[in-house]
Image (cartoon, rainbow, N blue to C red):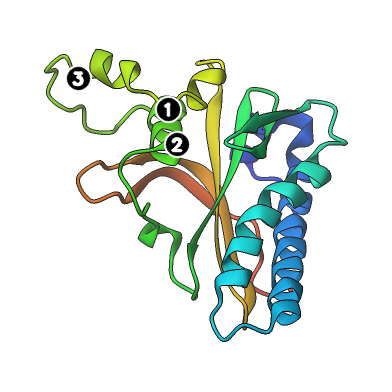
Amino acid sequence: MSAVTPWARDTFGTAAGQLARTIPACLVEAHKRARHGHEGVHTQTLEAYGHGLHAAQYETLGAGLAPLEAAMARRLQGRTIMVVGSNVIYPIRYAKKDVPVTAARLRKAVGFRADLIRRHGPEPMQQSLDLGLEELDEQHLHPDVALLPPELRLIIVAYACSMEQGVIRVEWGSAELRREDRYLIWHHHEPLLPSADPRAA
């Protein structure tokens, strides 16, 4: 992005500009690596691409963000997750085609990703009825999520990407997870990849 937005500056301080430039470049590199892996195994399905992209997204972000002064790597679920200041940077490929980030939803309402969003995402816009479930949820928290300090905030990097088109869309922001249908409800999101940028297809 050419300019740092007020939200990014408030969230990341002086690191905002470098993050806004580096994160999309890391995802483009992850796509290139995954496509190369797919071409190497010559399978008819896209399993190699999908699994490769999932692994490479964490590795490229880890390498790209490590030089930042406020960056720290945390090992969770066998992956390197980057923490910059008080923010956890977490990538999610939400689509294989160009659809709005508001279409993003998780495959499961339970597990590491869901717990990460519930614990470190923003407070829900609509509070659920207090049935004593919060305490119960904390007891069943994914053990890797429990390794993070509770005060950290989650910044989701949501992107659309396919082997044929490359990285199509990248946005970042904060979102809650709606339990009943697994959709991400964005409190704030903004693009990281201008429409004129090359997509590395």
Mark earlier in primary sequence (3, 2) = 2
Q: Which amino acid does label 1 sit on?
A: His
**Residue under label 1:** 142
Instruction: Tell me what residue is drawn at x 76 percent, y 67 percent.
Output: 33
The N terminus appears in which quarter of the rendering? bottom right
Q: How far apart are marks 3 and 2 (CA)?
A: 18 Å
Q: What residue type is labelled 2?
A: Phe
Q: How far apart are marks 1 and 2 (CA)?
A: 6 Å
Q: How crowded is mark 1: few (under 14 residues within 10 Å), some or many (20 or more)?
A: some
Mark 1 touching mark 2, by CB under 8 A?
A: yes
Residue 152 visible in rendering: yes
Q: Position of residue 150 (x, y in %)?
A: 50, 16
Q: Position of residue 39 (x, y in %)?
A: 72, 81
Nearer to the camera, 98 or 150: 150
Is 123 situated left or right of 6 in this image? left
Q: How far apart are marks 3 and 1 (CA)?
A: 16 Å
Instruction: Tell me what residue is drawn at x 70 percent, y 59 percent.
Output: 27
**Residue under label 2:** 112
Looking at the image, residue 44 lies above or below residue 170: below
